[in-house]
Amino acid sequence: MGRIIGLDIGDKKIGVALSDPSQVLASPFSTIIRDQDEKAINQIAALVKKYSASQIIIGLPYSLSGAIGKQAEKVLDFKGKIAEAVNVEIVMQDERLSSVSANQKLREAGKKGNKLKNEMDAAAATVILQSFLDERKMNGDISASNDPSH
């Protein structure tokens, strides 16, 4: 069983989280600067290979009403580019309020200013990935999917 990679995809940065080998706990891993999509996708593909990832979980930023807006469409487009570069299942996970939750957790941990800003993307990816892992465990389903494109 490989690890699972969680991604919080933004226009300028991509937060990355990684599960433990038993796929129970998500941890912040890094932030990829998204100045060139091809370069960012190559970095994601390298992580998939290095950690023998079995899945990628991508946060899908639904609007609060549940609709897919402009930002969600951008994320789905980027998902398609990742899918062309890797041969692992990609699952979309509802990420509404993940940044709010990540910000709160970082503040509770005493992070402020630039430290808070620098860790925000990876923390949001961690919230997304942990939500997926928790839902899968609650459902008793190894292949749980919230992917609207299925």
Image (cartoon, rainbow, N blue to C red):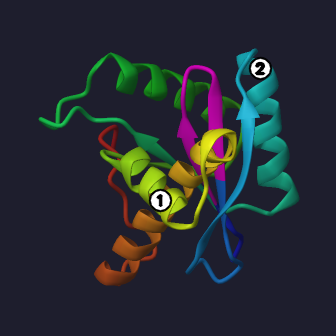
On the image, the x and y values in percent for residue 111 come to 61, 56
Q: Quadrant of the N terminus?
A: bottom right
Comparing 42 with 26, the one in front is 26
Badge 1: residue crowd in 10 Å (few <14, some 14–19, many ≥20): many
Above or below, 48 against 77 in this view is: below
Q: Which mark is residue 38?
A: 2
Residue 94 shows in this picture: no
Quadrant of res 110: bottom right
Q: Which residue is painted at 69% across and 68% down in the image? A: 3
**What range is drawn magenta here?**
5-16
Of callouts 2 and 1, the N-terminal one: 2
Q: Quadrant of the C terminus?
A: top left
Callout 2: SS: helix
- Report the mark closest to the observer, 2 or 1: 1
Residue 72: quadrant of the picture: top left
Measured Cα–Cα span from mark 2 to mark 1: 25 Å
Q: Which mark is residue 84?
A: none
Task: Write the residue at 58% across / 77% down.
Answer: 25
Using the image, determine if residue 49 lies above or below residue 114: below
> Does 88 appear in magenta?
no
For residue 127, the mark is 1
Q: Amino acid at mark 2?
A: Glu
Does residue 11 appear to the left or right of 136 in the view shown? right
For badge 1, the amino acid type reads: Val
Residue at image position (64%, 29%) is 13
**15 left or right of 75?**
right
Task: Give residue 31's position: percent from left, percent from top.
Answer: 72, 41
Q: Dot 1: what SS? A: helix
